[in-house]
Image: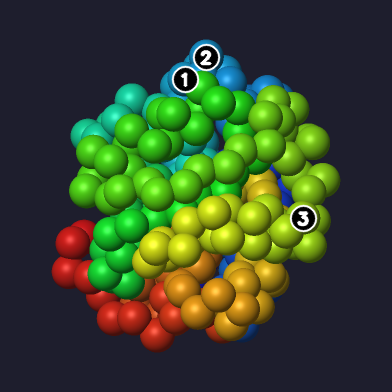
Amino acid sequence: MTRVGLVVPSSNTTVEPEFRDALPAEWTAHTARMPLEDVTADALDEMADDAERAASLLSHASVDGVAYACTTGSLLHGPGFDAALEAQLSEAVGGPAVATARSVVRALSALDADRVAVATPYTSELNEREREYLADNGFEVVALDGRELVANTAIGELTPAAAKRQARSVLQAAPNAEALFVSCTNYRSLSALSSIEAEFGVPVVSSNAATLWDLCDRLGAQPALELRLAAETSTGQH
């Protein structure tokens, strides 16, 4: 049996059910939480201080790998912070570790997408941090739409239908986009991604889809995702 460790914000209500639905049937998921209520730069920065402790607790359950399942929390300090975070958590659990922001970069690279449209629930400040992070990793953000939500519980209440409406809006504004990224591990969107792909004919990646794919790839399996991403092979960038 493969055990997957998840390090998540305390107010996140989406990672566990979306991972449970998409992980291989014989795998189990085990979660450790870091305090976070509001999705702001200061709160995310403070939350990151708890990451190593959370991963260390998951090591007590002998997890085979771990994901830092928070998008803005893993890109907050730009390129380099994500890699350092993965190294820190990998050492803590004695196995592979992925951080959502870096998983998104790997997924978009595997899809060979350079021009990316982005839909988020975030405030303009975090949206700009995300735009800069993607640009620093070689992607052109051709459209970005945010919902200006701060309370993470409010983000968790968004539905897949809401994600689909936002995705439709941002893709209509960016007909030259080569992929869509739906950002935030607490944004319930996994079940809507394949229908968005079918409607617009472009690959669609969410934070949880990218993290799932990346961690499963590290552990030698494929998640149950009906996405173009699920069919891609390893990027070789790990």
Write down the quadrant of residue 131 in the picture: top left
Along the line of sight, the residue nearer the viewer: 23 or 112: 112
**Residue 120 visible:** yes
Q: Which residue is mark 2?
A: 42
Mark toward the start of the polypeptide (3 vs 1): 1
Q: Earlier in the sequence, mark 2 or mark 3?
A: 2
Q: Which residue is mark 1?
A: 45
Tell me: residue 70, above or below residue 178. above
Identify which residue is drawn at 30% across, 48% down. 140
Assess whether mark 2 and mark 1 are in contact (beta carbons under 8 angstroms): yes
Q: Residue 119 or 53: which is nearer the viewer? A: 119
Give amino acid for label 3: Ala
Quadrant of residue 77 in the image? top left
Disc 3 element: helix
Side (left or right) of 215 relative to 238: right
| Residue 53 falls left or right of residue 150 | left
| Residue at 78%, 35% in the rendered image | 153
Say what amino acid the circle numbered 1 marks: Asp
List x then y, in percent, for residue 85.
Answer: 32, 37
Return the residue at label 3.
162
